[in-house]
């Protein structure tokens, strides 16, 4: 029993509206504070606090297990963890955690040797604050100044400050509503940055010249045509060109200007075309363009900056090879791709010779990291698998060799030989084969009685790689198997895999997840009721959909910041993200078919009088991505509708946003809470 005799019950207040001839009743609509993003409605706050108190009652009873899990997880993290130093110009840069610290400290020292200098001390910046998040950090080309973007309340509105490195003092605050990455001019005399408006839309790029008032800042580009487009700024890898991009989840458009003086007129590369993406780099007097204009799995092209709209294919598209990115270095195009769902890294000389960086395991994740220099001697590479700790290499193309620089250390000990990983293909109901990555201890018995932790995301073309996770060991060592379902909606098997899980095909994502669960039952990993599931944001929407459709399969579900009030959110174009989300979900305002489809699967709208598995739901009061009332309304409706006595807990972080708490140990406590919940519910 919980300390609270009964869970909170949110009052039902009459509220309805009509769209496309359909009347929608929403008696928990009042949980949305009309003054949002300010939330001070006494009734709303009272309900959220009651839910948190109810959750804290459960947490108090499980505190021993939570602390045990936390200490286990903390013991696998090196307290003074640090990154491998990387060269950029005349300096080596890296970050490190001081023992016990929640946040990183950033350092540099001259390449030729010398003292370690502190660039930015996150613990000092976070001291006394409930929330702190460093969004970006960029040293000026002359090495004398530092531009930082930091969020102090979880709202993802970042302050852009300029710091003088010689004194460690902030000399200018450029904006308090910045986002993205600051971009320095070649002469270190100013920064290009992007800002959000009142609706948290990144709507314009501006230029600030150091030493001038912010009233003199120049707007380089402002998005006025498409409500859902977001504006971003970046710099070519050869540092010659600044790119200003605008776009949504399906369409993009890019302009460029020389990095010496961004106030010169921008050059449009190619006008926006619906459902065409393109991304750009510059080197050797050419633009290098990565686009899906002719092939769903993208191609790489080049263009003359004087005639930027005429593209010549360099690497053609392919049904089998999914190109995921390209960076132009002095000697190579570094191309990332995915073949049959596995990462491939290829260096292509400008004469056309290609070299694939070799990796041995059958299932893994590999990625290019930390190569700020235009002409590196070696290419920095990251590598991991479900059983292999993250390893950092330098790859030398001259000798085709990988040099190990660092292997993720697990201080409390880790013996990879005790664990094994599999990559399975599960039959989906419509004939597709859905990949699943599974890891378990070698003494795990596939007898149909095992416990399984199943995770997925399945949206926005975001793949979940089969990577190492030290937290997961706490489940594996308790006899669980852990799996990642590479479902449609992600781009795990190519861009079409993404397209087949969005818009009119959205329900494929939910069906794939259920079919994976059933497939793992058929493979004797587990049985119905012994599967704990977890997903966040759009993955939280997935959690809501599958506990509505197949509740008997699952023994517990954890939905983090879940996007569950899909219909109401997509009908509200005043919300920050809604117009930009229509290419992913559909526009139910204008399209009745989209309205009907979203209404058919939106988790909040499809809660029904049935038994549900135990549920832990989280949210963030300042979250601009999934607003706090989505998980709150869902929890309230579930409480009023479901027919079981299974636990349901709602935890709203009152001082955090979409990512939960900001410090590394605080985040780890939240993972421990999740694991304690599923361990106590799945028997």
Image: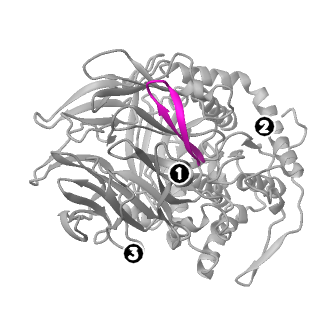
Looking at the image, which residue is at 39% across and 31% down? 144
Relative to residue 465, is residue 274 depicted above or below? Answer: below
Task: Specify the color scheme.
Answer: one colour
Tell me which label, 3 or 2, sits earlier in the chain. Answer: 2
Q: Position of residue 535 (x, y in %)?
A: 58, 48
Tell me which label, 1 or 2, sits earlier in the chain. Answer: 2
CA neighbours of label 3 inside 10 A, class few (<14), some (14 to 19), many (20+): few
Q: Are marks 3 and 1 in contact (CB under 8 Å)?
A: no
Tell me if residue 438 can be seen: yes
Number of numbered discs on residues: 3
Task: Specify the segment rendered in magenta.
Answer: 157-176
Looking at the image, which residue is at 80% across and 60% down? 34
Quadrant housing residue 102: top right
Mark seen at residue 517: 1
Instruction: Give the residue number, with chain letter if any, for mark 3.
Output: 273
**Secondary structure found at label 3:** loop
**Secondary structure found at label 1:** helix
The residues bearing labels 3 and 1 have C-alpha atoms spaced at a distance of: 39 Å
Which residue is at the front of the view, 78 or 425?
Answer: 78
Q: Position of residue 114 (x, y in %)?
A: 32, 15
CA neighbours of label 1 inside 10 A, class few (<14), some (14 to 19), many (20+): many
Mark seen at residue 55: 2
User: Is residue 431 located in the magenta-colored stretch of the structure?
Assistant: no
């Amino acid at each position: 029993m919980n300390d609270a005799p009964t869970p909170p019950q949110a009052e039902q207040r009459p509220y309805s509206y009509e769209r496309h001839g359909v009347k929608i009743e929403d008696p928990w609509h009042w949980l949305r504070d009309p003054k949002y993003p300010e939330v001070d409605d006494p009734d709303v706050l009272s309900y959220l606090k009651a839910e948190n108190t109810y959750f804290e009652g459960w947490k108090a009873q499980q505190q021993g297990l939570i602390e045990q899990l936390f200490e286990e997880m903390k013991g696998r993290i090196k307290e003074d963890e640090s990154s491998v130093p990387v060269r950029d110009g005349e300096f080596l840069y890296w970050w490190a955690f001081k023992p016990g610290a929640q946040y990183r400290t950033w350092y540099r020292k001259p390449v030729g040797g010398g003292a370690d200098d502190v660039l930015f001390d996150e613990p000092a910046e976070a001291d006394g604050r409930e929330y702190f998040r460093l969004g970006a950090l960029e040293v000026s080309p002359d090495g004398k100044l530092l531009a930082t973007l930091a969020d102090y309340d979880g709202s993802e509105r970042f302050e852009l400050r300029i710091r003088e490195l010689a004194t460690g003092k902030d000399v200018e605050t450029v904006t308090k509503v910045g986002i993205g990455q600051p971009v320095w001019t070649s002469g270190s005399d100013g920064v290009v940055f992007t800002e959000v408006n009142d609706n948290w839309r990144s709507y314009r790029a501006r230029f600030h010249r150091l030493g001038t008032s912010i009233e003199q800042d120049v707007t380089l580009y402002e998005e006025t045509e498409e409500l859902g487009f977001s504006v971003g700024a970046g710099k070519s890898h050869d540092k010659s060109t600044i790119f200003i991009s605008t776009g949504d989840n399906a369409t993009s458009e890019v302009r460029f200007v020389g990095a010496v003086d961004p106030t010169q007129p921008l050059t449009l590369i190619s006008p926006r075309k619906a459902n065409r993406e393109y991304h750009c780099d510059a080197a050797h007097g050419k633009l290098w363009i990565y686009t899906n204009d002719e092939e769903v799995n993208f191609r790489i092209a080049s263009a003359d900056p004087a005639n930027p709209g005429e593209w010549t294919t360099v690497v053609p598209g392919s049904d089998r090879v999914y190109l995921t990115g390209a960076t132009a270095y002095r000697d190579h195009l570094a191309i990332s791709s995915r073949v049959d769902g596995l990462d491939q890294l290829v260096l292509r000389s400008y004469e056309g010779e290609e070299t694939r960086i070799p990796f041995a395991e059958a299932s893994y994740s590999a990625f290019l990291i930390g190569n700020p220099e235009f002409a590196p001697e070696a290419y920095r590479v990251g590598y991991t698998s479900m059983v292999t700790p993250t390893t950092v290499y330098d790859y030398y193309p001259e000798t085709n060799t990988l040099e190990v620089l660092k292997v993720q250390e697990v201080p409390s000990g880790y013996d990879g030989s005790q664990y094994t990983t599999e990559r399975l293909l599960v039959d989906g109901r419509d004939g597709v084969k859905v990949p699943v990555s599974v890891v378990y201890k070698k003494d795990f018995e596939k007898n149909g009685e095992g416990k399984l932790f199943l995770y997925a995301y399945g949206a926005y073309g975001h793949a979940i790689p089969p990577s190492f996770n030290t937290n997961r060991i706490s489940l594996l060592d308790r006899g669980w198997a852990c799996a990642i379902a590479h479902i449609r909606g992600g781009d795990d098997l190519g861009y079409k895999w993404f397209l087949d899980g969005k818009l009119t095909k959205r329900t494929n994502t939910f069906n794939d997840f259920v079919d994976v669960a059933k497939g793992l039952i058929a493979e004797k990993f587990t049985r119905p009721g012994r599967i704990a599931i977890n997903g966040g944001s759009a993955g939280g929407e997935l959690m809501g959909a599958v506990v509505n459709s197949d509740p008997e399969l699952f023994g517990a579900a954890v939905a983090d910041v879940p996007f569950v009030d899909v219909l109401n959110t997509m009908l509200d174009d005043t919300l920050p993200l809604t117009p930009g989300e229509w290419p992913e979900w559909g526009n139910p305002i204008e399209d009745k078919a989209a309205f009907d489809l979203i209404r058919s699967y939106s988790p909040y709208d499809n809660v029904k009088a049935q038994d549900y598995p135990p549920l832990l739901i989280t949210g963030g009061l300042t979250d601009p991505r999934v607003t706090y009332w989505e998980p709150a309304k869902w929890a309230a409706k579930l409480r009023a509708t479901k027919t079981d006595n299974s636990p349901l807990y709602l935890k709203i972080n009152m001082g955090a946003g979409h990512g939960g708490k900001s410090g590394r140990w605080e985040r780890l406590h939240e993972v421990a809470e999740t694991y304690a919940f599923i361990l106590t519910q799945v028997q």
